[in-house]
Amino acid sequence: MVKKLLKYYFMFVSIFFIGRILLFIYYFHNFEDSGVDYWLTFLYGLRMDTVVISVLLVIPLIVLSFTPIKFAKSANSFLKYYFLVAFSLVIYIENATFPFVAQYDVRPNYLFVEYLIYPKEVFSMIFADYKVELLISFAMICLFGYFYLKLAKDDFLEIFKSAYLKRVVLFLPILALLFMGVRSSFGHRGVNISDAMYTTNRMVNEITKNSLHSIGYAVYSEVVHEGGEVKNYAKMDVKEALERIKKRLDIQTISDEDVLLRVENSHFKSDKPKNLVIFVQESLGYQFVEAVGGEEGITPNFNKLSKEAILFRDLYSNGTRSVRGLAAMSAGNLAVPGEEVVKRNKSQSDFFTIASLLKPFGYYTAFMYGGESRFDNMRGWYSGNGFDEIIDQPKIQNPTFVAPWGVCDEDLVVQANEEFKKMHAKGQKFATVMFSQSNHSPFEFPCEKIELLKDVPPNSVKNAVKYADYAVGRLFELAKKDGYYEDTVFVVVADHNVRVYGDDMVPVDMFHIPAMILGGGIKPMVYDKIASQPDVLATALDLIGLDLKYPIMGHSIFSDKKQNLSLMQFHSSYALRVDDKVAIVRPSQASLTFAYKEPQTYSDRSNHLTMVEHDEELEKDALAFVIALDYVYNKKLYR
């Protein structure tokens, strides 16, 4: 049984290899001088192929293991035609890949299946434009089918003659091997489509992918993550929703056709625009930071640096997951219903980010993470949306401490400093998003680097936060010593709070996070009005000194258009806070309005929302955000 399954494994691999090598040859001119290690596409590609093949072999394994001998002929026929269909599908998809790549410059993705709901139009287009390709595909399938049926007539009968118990016993170890093939990883996370994006050259990454896997991932994303969550909320016309969020955010677009795009002139216009570094802190809740009302002694570096910075005292995160904060601080969008855009299919390219914004001004852009950037599809999203380089754990040189989630934050900071020094030395403007990871369970970090908190376990969230704060201090120590501090705008901001808890329908106080902006020429101040993460990004972009055009869902605090609001997603609920009033919309339930009372101290865990009379306009605006965000995403209008 093992030999037979291996035989079919190598047959599938051969087809995928032929398709990949033909793509490699045809598009070689795109990357021959790129400087990337393009030969590894075949190794990484084999990994992606193995995922698909392992899935395809599960059904044959079940049939071969549990079919009694008296049904052997029926099972043999089933498997023979099962593999015929599977091979035909693979051959067709591999053939279809070539015109698809020629048209869209990517392997088949959601576009390959999205328009199948319009079969008349789609098939008319295929028959009109791809007659030759269809003829070749069907000829190859027919030729393969003829020889396969001839040679595989009784291919499986010998296996069924083996003892039934022996086949049953073999089932679990072979299934374990297939499971390992599907995961294709011994780490915390199984392989996903971003594992194919191992270079900075997009075409090499596309060749590395497996088309069937890419399509399957797209279908999975559409059905599981993007399956119409917004339909469960109350109804509102899209046009009304868009008008409401524009009014609520005070966004005046370039034209009526533009959804959010507008021109924002800098309040700090400069002939020498500054670099931008955004250091996103994992799970840094406000309760750990004395400067914004939290506990003393945990973040001494943040507290000290905040005195020379613009300090946001009343900032609220988009949501409760890292991808929400990363999207907010890299793209300036609010949280879409369902899965965040970093992991969703339609935002893997042509989605606005600071990379696409600043590239025309000569900026070199990078995303840096101390762990594996394939987690949560970060690598795929950042590389697909304009970032020039992804630097993650495998690229961190000589790490001093490696934890389950990656290298320690100081190693990340030291690597970042080396990158910034090199670019500063040659006059290259840069914009980098850094993402810390040391403050993450199981909270492993180099304890000797800090004075551990008294009466607190070493590997605890508070000590992990203190270590992360130490790394923040190191970044600025190095930046000031190595000369690029004066030419750079730095942002230190949390992605979300460490835990969001409380009995409130939406625990607004646990969305409270710290942020500060500092750098050469920035005058210290405390901004104590309500702000969102997109507001922080807009403020940082304002400070670099360029007039810009963007769709960011927030405003610089130096703009008279800045609104005193935040939008927070908590599971399937959305809370729109304006001043001290909060409207909450939930799927399949009525909207509600609450008065919000700020906690007296960081340790106040009492309820902070009190239900009040419905504010119908505020509730409609909250619903408008849900409807509009879903619409803008699905129509790919955030650009």
Image (tube, grey):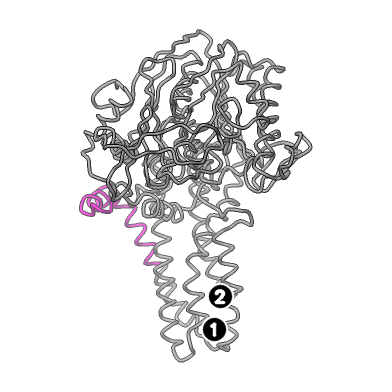
Q: Is residue 319 above or below residue 50?
A: above
Q: Secondary structure at mark 1?
A: helix
Question: Which residue bears the numbered disc 1?
Answer: 159
**Which residue appears farthest toward the bottom when viewing the image?**
70
C-beta proximity under 8 Å, tags 1 and 2: yes
CA gap, disc 1 to disc 2? 9 Å
Few, some or many residues within 10 Å of mark 1 (<14, 14–19, 20+):
some
Q: Main secondary structure of the magenta part?
A: helix
Q: Secondary structure at mark 2?
A: helix
Amino acid type, callout 1: Ile
Q: Write the residue at 63% across / 26% down.
A: 302
Q: Position of residue 505 (x, y in %)?
A: 40, 45
| Displayed quadrant of residue 449 | top right
Task: Answer with left or right where residue 585 lies relative to residue 530.
Answer: left
Check if residue 125 falls in the magenta segment. yes
Q: Looking at the image, which is closer to me, 622 or 150?
A: 622
Magenta segment boundaries in residue numbering: 115-143
